Structure formats: C-alpha cells, structure tokens
Image (tube, helix red, strand yellow):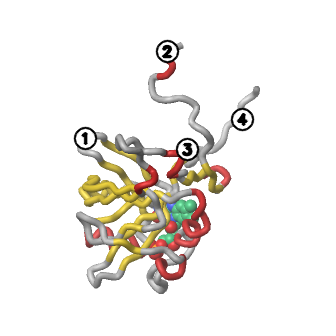
Amino acid sequence: MKKVQLKPSTYLCPVPAVLVSCQDRGGRPNLITIAWTGVVCSDPPMLSISIRPSRYSHGIIRESGEFVVNIPSADIVRKVDLCGIISGRDTDKFEKAGLTPLPASHVSPPLVKECPFNIECRLTEIVPLGVHDMFLGEIVATHINEDCVDESGQVNVGKVNPLAFTPPDRSYRSMGDALGSYGFARKL
Ligand SMILES: Cc1cc2nc3c(=O)[nH]c(=O)nc-3n(C[C@H](O)[C@H](O)[C@H](O)COP(=O)(O)O)c2cc1C
C-alpha cells in the first residue's frame, strides 16, 4: 500500500476521553472534558492533562493545585461531550449533564459518581508548551466501582468499558475485546 504524507498534527489515536473535576476557592465544582491526557510516570504514579489557558478550568486548577481524573464508561458519552462544549463560567455542568458529585478522600474537587474510575491528583508542575499548558499531577488516591473489581482486587476493564477518542475523525469510540495480555507473546 502506497503511503501519503499528512502535515504534522495530533493524529495519535486512540486517546482517552476523560472528565476532569476541579473546584474553585468558593467551593464551586466544575468539569472539563480532556483528551490530551496520559500516564507520565509509574513511581511516583503521575499523569498529565493539557489545558488551554482560555478554559475556565485552567485558572481553577492552577490556583487550587488539585483535580480528579474521572474515567467515563462509553455509555455516558453524551454527557462527556456536553462537558466539552459548554463552559463552567456560566453553567453548573454537574446539574446540566445530570452528573453527581461525591466527596473525594484526599483532595477538594469531587469525584463523578457516574464514572467507574476516579483518580485524585495533586498538581506538581505546569509546563507551558504552546497553545496548551501541561499540568502534571501526582496520583494520591484512586477509586473504582465495586462491581468493576473481583475479590482479589483485579480490575475488570471490560466492565469499566472506558471511552476512547480518535482525534483524526474527532469521534468517540468504545473499546473492543482484549486481544492478549502483557507478555503473552512469550508463550508462543
Ligand atoms: C472530546 C473533547 C476533548 C477535549 N480535550 C481538551 C483538552 O485536552 N484540553 C483542553 O484544553 N480542552 C479540551 N476540550 C475542550 C474543553 O473541554 C471545552 O472547551 C470546555 O468547554 C472547557 O470548559 P471550562 O471552560 O468549563 O473549563 C475537549 C473537548 C472535547 C469535546
């Protein structure tokens, strides 16, 4: 197959689509949909979220130093999209999207009840990159729905059914079946 060359862009796919919760000094929570997120270190466990300075959430997280990365299931895709097209400056997104805030254990911003996985983070650094600033966060606590873990603590990702996003066509997708597990090629 012949290749065609595209201009340099953010075609990396799939990426997650997550709901990040934050809370201002007055105790008012907000949500922002984020696709530019990833794991950046295993120990200490750290992740990044990249946010444009124009977003209302940017100033909130910069000032509070805390945020929660909530991993949505594919079935709440419309709520995830809604939180990515309206601003919390003038709207209560929890109310508008029909999402429920739950108290976190280590940070002030709430967890999103409807998201099976919730990752509490403390901001360690902001790295200006260009149109986005990268917020690095240390993971200080993780919560998961009871029915998504078995008795031995093994996470059932199939039940979490995490939502994926594919930037080249700006589409949301659900994940297919597991194809193998880390190192399974050694058994061949
Ligand atoms: C699928 C999707 C992914 C997005 N990813 C990002 C992102 O990674 N960084 C960002 O700054 N904005 C991103 N946005 C846009 C913000 O979510 C959107 O501007 C939002 O309304 C900002 O809310 P706020 O003003 O309440 O902070 C994304 C939107 C969608 C729909």
Q: Position of residue 17 (x, y in %)?
A: 52, 56
Q: Mark 3 is on which residue type? A: Leu
Q: Quadrant of residue 53?
A: bottom left
Task: Kindly state the secondary structure of the residue where label 3 is placed.
Answer: loop
Q: Residue at x 25, y 66 (%)?
A: 107
Residues packed near mark 2 inside 10 Å, few (<14), some (14 to 19) or many (20 plus): few
Q: Position of residue 85 (x, y in %)?
A: 57, 72
Q: Which residue is mark 3?
A: 12
Residue furthest to the top: 188
Q: Residue at x 61, y 50 (%)?
A: 174
Q: Which residue is mark 1?
A: 43
Q: Measure the C-alpha gap from mark 4 to mark 2.
A: 37 Å
* Of callouts 2 and 1, the N-terminal one: 1
Q: Residue at x 71, y 31 (%)?
A: 3
Q: Which residue is mark 4?
A: 4
Q: Mark 4 is on which residue type? A: Val
Q: Mark 1 is on which residue type? A: Asp
Q: Measure the C-alpha gap from mark 1 to mark 3.
A: 25 Å
Q: Is residue 122 above or below residue 180?
A: below
Q: Residue at x 28, y 53 (%)?
A: 139
Task: Kindly state the secondary structure of the residue where label 2 is placed.
Answer: helix
Q: Which residue is mark 2?
A: 187
Residue furthest to the right: 1
Q: Measure the C-alpha gap from mark 3 to mark 2.
A: 30 Å
* Of callouts 1 and 3, the N-terminal one: 3
